[in-house]
Amino acid sequence: MTVRAALAGISGILVTPFDAADEIAPARLAPIVARCAAAGVDALTVNGNTSEFYGLSYAEAERMQAEVPAIVAGRARVVAGIGRSVKEAVRLAARAKADGADAIMVHQPPDPFVSPRGVVDYVRRAGEAAGLPVVLYLRNPGIGDGAVAALCALPSVVAVKWASPDMMALARAMRAAPGVLFVCGLAEPWAPAMTGLGAQGFTSGLINVAPDRSVAILKALRAGDLADANARIAAIAAFEALRAEEQNGANVSVVKAALALMGEDAGPTRPPAAWPLAPDSLARLGTLMAGWGLVRDGR
């Protein structure tokens, strides 16, 4: 499967497991990757936001990028998240191909003084260093339509993960870059609306826990069965609502707590994420996971 075809499906964002000493433990991803491969998730991202990219040291991000492709072992396309200072981004990008990544995903720089043309230069440098297809991860279209068009015109850019609810800006971007694949970057709940505009596929953190549910939503969308897709999205609404608690600070924490309930210890999340989950939230998560038949006996 080509990189573009894989990105048009589900872009699963893997968690970063930690051990009891707060060290990264990439090998703990093995059951998660196996579950995703069996369900039919075609693209897996390391060092994405669900991976707590900005909670990792550079050395940790480098090691995750180096070790995860071997764990995936060709069962899905691997996308390496790239970001931080431009020098660090270029360093990560330069080794991504040798590490076994099939593409890089460039995080939109969070610098408070980011300039539109500076973002274009940032992505250009990372793409040139990688020599791989580039996926833009755009969370804020406030850089302007011109900058978005300039980013999409970079020869290495093949796809945009659009993570903004500004649908009008999405429509303008798609008209300005007809040759670029646009992917729903706001996960399953926003996929029907963005699919209606012509986007394909979606990102997902749910895949760490229940990839079969994500794949079923994708199949419904591809079949044009919006009623089925929306019903399946409603069935995961409680999970996504828990992730949105504490100003979205529970986003990754809920995923890791769910994995613990399944008997797959991925460790805690790091500050500034919310950990541990509030007792009421954990109880609701346990009830939901039990209803899905995913709680390991004794948990």
Image (cartoon, grey):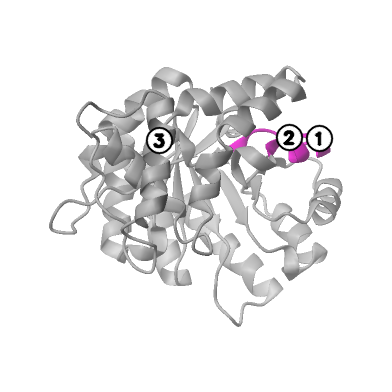
Q: Is residue 148 left or right of residue 241?
A: right
Closest to the camera, between mark 3 and mark 2, is: 3
Based on the picture, tell me whether residue 195 belongs to the magenta stretch.
yes
Which residue, given by chain and number where applicable, does mark 1 sit on?
A: 196
Image quarter where the C terminus lies is top left
Q: Nearer the viewer, residue 197 or 106?
A: 197
Which residue, given by chain and number where applicable, does mark 3 sit on?
A: 287
Residue 14 visible within the image: no
Q: Earlier in the sequence, mark 3 or mark 2?
A: 2
Q: Residue 27 at x, y = what percent?
A: 21, 39
Q: Is residue 152 left or right of residue 101?
A: right
Based on the picture, tell me whether residue 263 belongs to the magenta stretch.
no
Please tell me whether mark 2 sits on a helix, a strand or a loop: helix
Q: Nearer the viewer, residue 23 or 277?
A: 277
Q: Residue 229 at x, y = what percent?
A: 68, 25
Question: For the residue marked with disc 1, what is the amino acid?
Answer: Gly
Question: For the residue marked with disc 2, what is the amino acid?
Answer: Pro
Which residue, given by chain and number where applicable, does mark 2 sit on?
A: 192
Which residue appears at 81% of the width and 35% of the height? 196
Q: Nearer the viewer, residue 105 or 240?
A: 240
- Whether pointer 1 and pointer 2 mark residues with C-beta atoms closer than 8 Å, the reply is yes
Residue stretch rendered in magenta on the structure: 191-202
Please tell me whether mark 1 sits on a helix, a strand or a loop: helix
Q: Residue 60 at x, y = what percent?
A: 27, 58
Which residue appears at 35% of the width and 64% of the height? 55
Question: For the residue marked with disc 3, what is the amino acid?
Answer: Thr
Please tell me whether mark 3 sits on a helix, a strand or a loop: helix
Q: Residue 207 at x, y = what percent?
A: 45, 34
